[in-house]
Image (cartoon, rainbow, N blue to C red):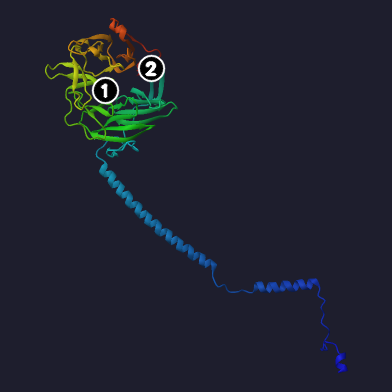
Amino acid sequence: MSELRGQHDNLTDGPARSYQVRPDELEGAVRETLSRQVARTRPLSVDPAGKAIRRANRIRRRRTTVGLALGAVTAVLLSVGMTQLGAETRRDGSPIVVIGDPDPANRPLPTVTIPGPAPSPAPVVGQTLLSTDGRRMVLQDVGPAERAQPLPGGDGWLVVGAPSTAGRSLWVVRDDGLVQVLLAGAGAIVLAPDSLQVAWRDGGDLLVAGVVGTQLIGAVRTPVPAAAEPVRFVADSVLVRLDPADGGHTLWRPGAGPLPKAPDHKSLNVYGLLPDGRLVGQVATSDSGRICLAVLAPTRHLDPVRTGCGPDVSHDGVGGLSPDGRWLLVNGGTGEADRSLLVDLQRLGPAATAVTAGPPMTGSIVWSDETHASYLDAAGDLVEVDVSQVRAGKPASPAAVPGMPAGERPILVERL
């Protein structure tokens, strides 16, 4: 036992274990161990690349299916739309595009005509506006024109073109320089006094639309006889001349049905509105066959309320009423064709008379107040009528417009 107690714990006879390892040897051993672990390949339970490819294929197939379905629906809708558009096309004419409707109640939906190429507007030139106080303004990039009215906001003008082989045009000319064609290739065009509406002849129809900015909106149409044309707005209706040769007028209210079937056939011309809403015009009497001036009721038949058959007046329809409705300027008839006449409507009756006001009138007559009016004569000279002077036996004389080029006629407006 004593011998056993004397032996060391290491019972082997080999050399003693060395625990002294250099740092570089330890580092090399660690590196070798890690390299072997990295080099060993372990099988993956899931293939990420294959899974991503399969998912992409499924998404592509779904997108292709949806795209084909949408394409089929679009083709069907386009086919239906073109069928409806073809059914609504009734005739050839200038294309008219309208959007919206400020008052769609009881109004038929407007139709859209899609013909061949639209007629070109009148040639683009300049047009001079001349106010009654002598001021002038040149409107650039508009064709030859007949009339002009201020826009509702006062920031420009609505300009009605003169007739041409391509029809009439309607421009909006704003003070900021914008010039845009609202209508081209139209027939007769008339503007409401406040410039908020326009009526025009288009093929076999009469149309009325609102003017908003640089667009026509809420167009309403009705068929009209071959020679019918709009004359003026009367409140919320349009006065329509049925035949310029045979006479006859009627009032059409847009959206309230077609033209009346039993129109008036006595009135030849209508010159304007009195403050109370009645009209002043020219009628053919049924008893004597004479042509007389008359005050007309604003009904569908324009029934004469009062007539005056004394003055010999022209059938050309040129004339204008003073703002208070007392004075009428009108061209003389056969026996007085070389002059314009001033008629006192307060004395309109069997003994009505007229006095010479000046040379014959052309175009529009502009009244600056109750007793002063201006117009252009056949030569384009300006004639300024003073009622008090005319009544005293001193007719107005024409005067050349200073600075106007030869052959150019200005458009008279009340103010600039």
- Numbered circle sitting on residue 47: none
- Along the viewing direction, whichever of 136 and 168 lies nearer the viewer: 136
Residue at numbered disc 2: 131
Is residue 49 toward the left or the right of residue 289 in the image? right
- Along the viewing direction, whichever of 97 and 217 lies nearer the viewer: 217
The relative height of residue 65 versus residue 177 in the rendered view (above or below) is below
Q: Residues within 10 Å of mark 1 (few under 14, many from 20)?
A: few
* Quarter residue 279 falls in: top left
Q: Residue furthest left?
A: 287
Q: Residue furthest top?
A: 393
Residue 41: image location, x then y, percent: 61, 74
Residue at numbered disc 1: 277
Residue drawn at (85%, 87%) of the image: 8
Q: Residues within 10 Å of mark 2 (few under 14, many from 20)?
A: some
- Along the viewing direction, whichever of 358 and 1 lies nearer the viewer: 1
Residue 142: image location, x then y, percent: 38, 26
- Along the viewing direction, whichever of 410 and 235 lies nearer the viewer: 235
Instruction: State the separation of the CA atoms marked 1 and 2.
Output: 27 Å
Instruction: Tell me, yes or no, whether the two marked residues, 1 and 2, touch with CB atoms within 8 Å.
Output: no
Tag nearer the camera, 1 or 2: 1
Identify the element where label 1 is drawn. loop
The amino acid type of the residue labelled 2 equals: Ser
Is residue 309 toward the left or the right of residue 231 in the image? left
Give the total of numbered labels. Answer: 2
Could you tell me if residue 331 is visible in this image?
no
* Quarter residue 333 falls in: top left
* Quarter residue 88 falls in: top left
Q: Residue furthest bottom?
A: 1
Residue 89: image location, x then y, percent: 26, 41
